[in-house]
Image: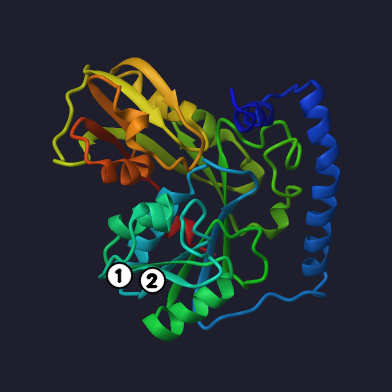
Amino acid sequence: MNLKTQITKLHYNKNPKGLLFNLLKFCSIFYSIGSGVKNFLYDKNILKPKKVEAFVISVGNFTTGGVGKTPVVAELAKYFIEKGDRVAIVSRGYGGKLDNKKVNVISDGINLYYKADMAGDEPYWLAVNLNMCAVLTCSNRVRACEYAIKELGVTKIILDDGFQHRKLHRDLNLVLVDSEKQFGNGYQLPAGPLREKIAFNRVDKLIVISKNIDHSNAEMLFAEQNPIVCKIEPDYAYNIISGEHIEKGSEITAISAIGQPEQFYKFLEPDYKIKEKITFDDHHQYTLADIENIEGNIITTEKDAVKLALLGKQNIYALKLKTILDIENLLKK
């Protein structure tokens, strides 16, 4: 087990102990001070966010990785595109090889300019799966938004993973919480998964992500915040080269490189015979050596599939998920 995996296990252990945790907890003091000072300066208007000439929606979360931002971002983009808006998704581009100090246009809504290894798996997936939606990456979100407005005529901007990026004004702050993982052990980074102290006062709408078949638990959480429940369920698995579906009940190897792989495996267990589960680090860049000795069919996530498709193997399938989210209710004031 590598260090990153050990730390992730500590993040979601309700009673973490040990030398490593104690060291991380000490480091969390300094992280907490830095995060607290930044938020204090913005809360008191000592630092002011930059407003751009478009409607900006931030989709973010209090914790690190794997909550379910990408399907929510996709559903929002589809909704606004159908309404006739010119939409752009702006992401930091984590995991890609492009220089994210520059504005990188992954897609202008018509043309795709980069592959997954360069763009990052999430921006690439969004660019491939959303027609008429621009996707840009840059660590300077203000610069990326201004570029999208000026050069691409964008009227609606969806800020992917933007809750902590307070330099940019947003008109709507959406924050996601995983119904199972919630806030982990309750500590801030690096001892826990929290990116900052929980501040519901900055949240316009809380979205509880339920990655399950039974959503009753999710529907009871955070009632005082009047949340919207987003239901994410498994649909079918398709071959990433041919598009052919794999039969339910097939024997498969499950592989993933995402923030919270356990839920992916749970999605597969009722419908497929899993002979092995292989987990890589989040945003892992696959090589042929990773999969060439795996016999039989492989099922992976759609995020992983965009990188695995570059390897040209015929035995890889991606699990398609369906997202059930009431966008009209979500956007009500």
Q: Which mark is residue 268?
A: none
Residue tagged 2: 87
* Image quarter (top left, top right, bottom left or bottom right) of the N terminus: top right
Residue tagged 1: 109
The amino acid type of the residue labelled 1 equals: Gly
Foreground of the two, 214 or 112: 112
Relative horizontal placement of residue 308, taking residue 205 as reference (left or right): left
Seen at 22% across and 20% down, the residue is 296
* Image quarter (top left, top right, bottom left or bottom right) of the C terminus: bottom right
Residue 234 spot, x, y in % from top left: 33, 33
Q: Specify few, some or many for label 2: CA neighbours under 10 Å numbering under 14, 14-19, or 20 or more.
A: many
Q: Secondary structure at mark 1?
A: loop
Q: Specify few, some or many for label 1: CA neighbours under 10 Å numbering under 14, 14-19, or 20 or more.
A: some
The amino acid type of the residue labelled 2 equals: Val
Residue 25 spot, x, y in % from top left: 82, 35
**How many badges with numbers are in the image?**
2
Foreground of the two, 304 or 57: 304
Q: Nearer the viewer, mark 2 or mark 1?
A: 1
Q: Secondary structure at mark 2?
A: strand
Residue 136 spot, x, y in % from top left: 43, 67
**In the rendered view, would you say 38 is above or below 168?**
above
For residue 292, which quarter of the picture? top left
On the question of residue 326 being in view, the answer is no
The residues bearing labels 2 and 1 have C-alpha atoms spaced at a distance of: 9 Å
Seen at 48% across and 26% down, the residue is 262
Seen at 61% across and 44% down, the residue is 64
Instruction: Kindly check if marks 2 and 1 are in contact, taking CB atoms under 8 A apart as contact.
Output: yes
Q: Earlier in the sequence, mark 2 or mark 1?
A: 2
Seen at 32% across and 70% down, the residue is 83
